[in-house]
Image: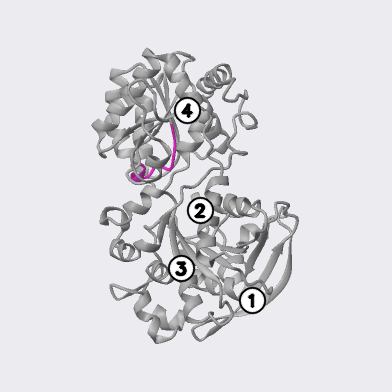
Amino acid sequence: MRIAVFASEGAPYAKSGGLGDVMEALPAALSRIPGNEVVLVLPYYKKIKENPAYPVRQVAQCTVKLGWRRQYAGVMALQGRSDGVKVYFIDNDYYFGARPGSIYGDGDDGERFAYFSKACLEALMAIHYIPDVIQCNDWQTALVPTLLRAVYRPEFQDTKCMFTIHNIEYQGWANPDFFDDVLALPWGWRSTLDMNHCVNMMKGAIETADLVTTVSETYARELMYPYYAHGLDGILTDAAWKLTGITNGIDVNTFNPATDPALPWHYDAQSFRVGKADCKAALQQEVGLPVKPDVPMLVMVTRLAGHKGLDLLCYIARKLLWAEDCQMVILGTGEDHFERFFKGLQEEFPDRVAALITFNLGLASRIYAGGDIYMMPSKSEPCGLSQMNAMRYGTVPVVHATGGLKDTVPPVDEHGEGGLGFTFQSYNGDDFLGALERCIHLYKKEPEKFRALQQRDMEQDFSWDKPAQRYMDLFREMTNR
């Protein structure tokens, strides 16, 4: 099957969050399925253009119409990728190649990614690649399904389109003039993109895509409720017949305690008792905590943002530290008031708390490996990757049962059996504290059962192979193949 994937970011070339991780792993997993030909199209950002590790060759060029404007688009083919995925970059200095800084956040982001959506389709025609399926992601490529139906159907007569929601909070809003000034679509399509008298690109994608997916089964159901849907609950309820959740995987080669170069000692599900203990002792030394092998270490690697449930952790942190003999390690940067809180907590409990206000991938791996209990009380979590990373390293998760956390961390009973971690249902601090106390109790009072839970977590298959097969099932359903 011929599959084209469009996205605004993809590791290792450009990444700002979870979408970048998915775009590194999913195309590669799809390409491993016999009979597939996979193309990934990304913007040619300045950071990619100036990186000698990514040699390219221009294979085509085309013109993209944006309202009254005509913009150049160079189609640059990446050289030397060995996993079968053909990567193409859309080259345009005005929109991508000459802008320093982050991927998003410019005042004309709407125009930039409207251009990119059109340029992706023009590029496929320029390289004579007409796919069976296009899979596009989040608001930055949400115009693609509408463009396919409104403008490009003659060139892509049999091509089906899947739209995947990774983060519904960002929907691609624009003022009403954007429809004429930038998109210049036939007037009959205005109502498709109109929401509250503005343009909403994600709304248009939900209405015009052949299938809509999101990144976990539970999150797909949650999006029917206003609490999660950020205003699109009615649109998604009407489209419920074509909405499906597919839980993400993780890169099990990168996140592998048996080979991770960032770890001082390696281990697997059979040797973790010694290897993980050594990693814990090394982490305690590295972050300045007393080396105490029998004290549970609670860890978190996260962006310090409100929706990550940090208000709950702030509420219960002192209660927990007063009541339990434990250590706490927090790694991340973000909102200033959270950074100040955790710095203050470290000053108050210097021998029990390490607040590492930084971004460090190697240290993150060592925290996954050295920790005993992973805290993830997110208010909402479409899928979540950290809980799967933690389990891969044998660190038991304690999570709020929402979105992908509910799907990937079935709850254990009071003896640590029957599931993979500890959960709490209601989003409040006391329930979070109760779940942590149950986990700590198992660690201290029934250590063999805690070790059995760690081993069970490490033996789970969180690879992309199963999600990729689910995508293929839907692709076949869409194309009747």
Which label's residue is closer to the chain start, 1 or 2?
Answer: 2
Which label's residue is closer to the chain start, 2 or 3?
Answer: 2
User: What amino acid does circle 4 point to?
Assistant: Thr
Residue 210 numbered tag: 3
The CA distance from mark 3 to mark 1 is 21 Å
The CA distance from mark 1 to mark 2 is 26 Å
Would residue 230 be visible to someone looking at this image?
yes
Q: Which of marks 2 and 3 is in front?
A: 3
Q: Mark 1 points at which residue?
A: 125
Which label's residue is closer to the chain start, 3 or 1?
Answer: 1
Residue 395 numbered tag: 4
User: What amino acid does circle 3 point to?
Assistant: Asp
Element type at mark 2: helix
User: What amino acid does circle 2 point to?
Assistant: Leu
Residue 19 numbered tag: 2
Q: Residue at x 58, y 35 (%)?
A: 362
In this picture, residue 332 sits left or right of residue 269: left
What residue range appears in magenta?
300-308
User: What amino acid does circle 1 point to?
Assistant: Met
Splitting the image into 4 quarters, where does residue 74 fall?
bottom right
Vertical side of 478 occupied by 425: above or below: above
What x and y, as percent, mark residue 187?
A: 39, 86
Asked whether the beta carbons under mark 1 and mark 4 sit within 8 Å of each other, the answer is no
Vertical side of 35 occupied by 436: above or below: above
